[in-house]
Amino acid sequence: MTNDFVQLSDFFAQADWNSRIYLLLRHAERNHITPGDKDFGAHVGLTERGRHQAVLLGKMVPAFGDAVYFSSPVGRCMETAKCIGEGRKLAGYVDQGAASAAKVMPLDALGDFFVRDVPAYEQTLREGFYEGICKWLEAGYHDAFFPLHERAEQMREMMFTKGNSRFNIFVTHDAWVVPCLSHFCNMKFTPKCWMNFLTGLAFEVPEKGNVKVTPVTTMETGWLLFR
């Protein structure tokens, strides 16, 4: 297993055609969240560049096989998933009657799957989002969150249960992709070294054999570095 990100186009080029693919991705580039935002950026949408990035991602998804899209109910995630579906259509995918082929299904779990205590989580956001998440990653437990490793396994099983298509695309927030990258790929994050937009994990589920996990990105790099 690699501990660096693989370009999503390269991943699809080598993927087993008989496998189901499950993508867990952070949304596309968003507008800035201002300090002190009372709803912690829930209303903040994508940039124009972010929408374009998501369409390009959709064009990478092979046209062979059906696809289904799940998203956090937060607007920027829903918009990302819709743009991915639109990109796949532009690339030549033809809907052959599957009603859900380009429909985005909001999934509440993708908005708060790891949160155990909402007031404690909101306090963590106020005190420092990146710092709080990194403390949880390092210790494996935190008052605001479910136990890291157990919950990451449950996230994967939830995805496998919800999606039964050739391509199953789940769009959520960095707060829930980062712990999965930490658990499944042993990736290390700090408040100054974070994950990029449209970056996450690909689970390749064959008809027989072991599930393969690959950290993937559609960006030039899967990392965001802060000063």
Image: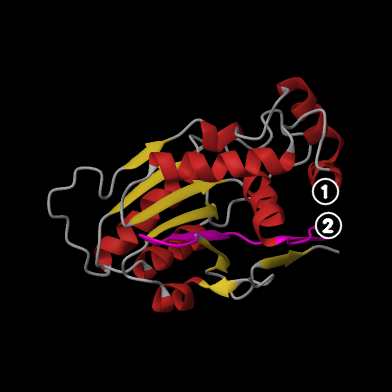
Residue drawn at the location 53% of the way across and 56% of the way down: 28
Please provide the residue range marked out in magenta: 186-210
Q: Would you identify the image quadrant in which residue 58 lies? A: bottom left
Disc 1 crowd, CA 10 A, few/some/many (<14, 14-19, 20+): some
Q: Which is nearer the eye, 161 or 84?
A: 161
Is any part of residue 76 visible from this angle? Answer: no
Are dots 2 and 1 in contact, CB under 8 Å? yes
Which of disc 1 and disc 2 is earlier in sequence?
A: 1
Q: Which is nearer the eye, 137 or 199?
A: 137
Residue drawn at the location 73% of the way across and 62% of the way down: 187
Where is 177 relative to 92, above or below? above
Disc 2 crowd, CA 10 A, few/some/many (<14, 14-19, 20+): some
Where is 88 relative to 30, above or below? below
- Screen quadrant of the N terminus: bottom right
Decide if residue 25 is on the left or right side of residue 19.
right
- Screen quadrant of the C terminus: bottom right
Disc number for residue 40: none
Q: Which residue is mark 1?
A: 134
Residue drawn at the location 67% of the way across and 39% of the way down: 150
Report the amino acid beneath label 2: Thr
Q: Which residue is mark 2?
A: 190
Residue drawn at the location 26% of the way across and 67% of the way down: 63
Q: Secondary structure at mark 2?
A: loop
**Residue 19 percent across, percent down from the top left:** 36, 63
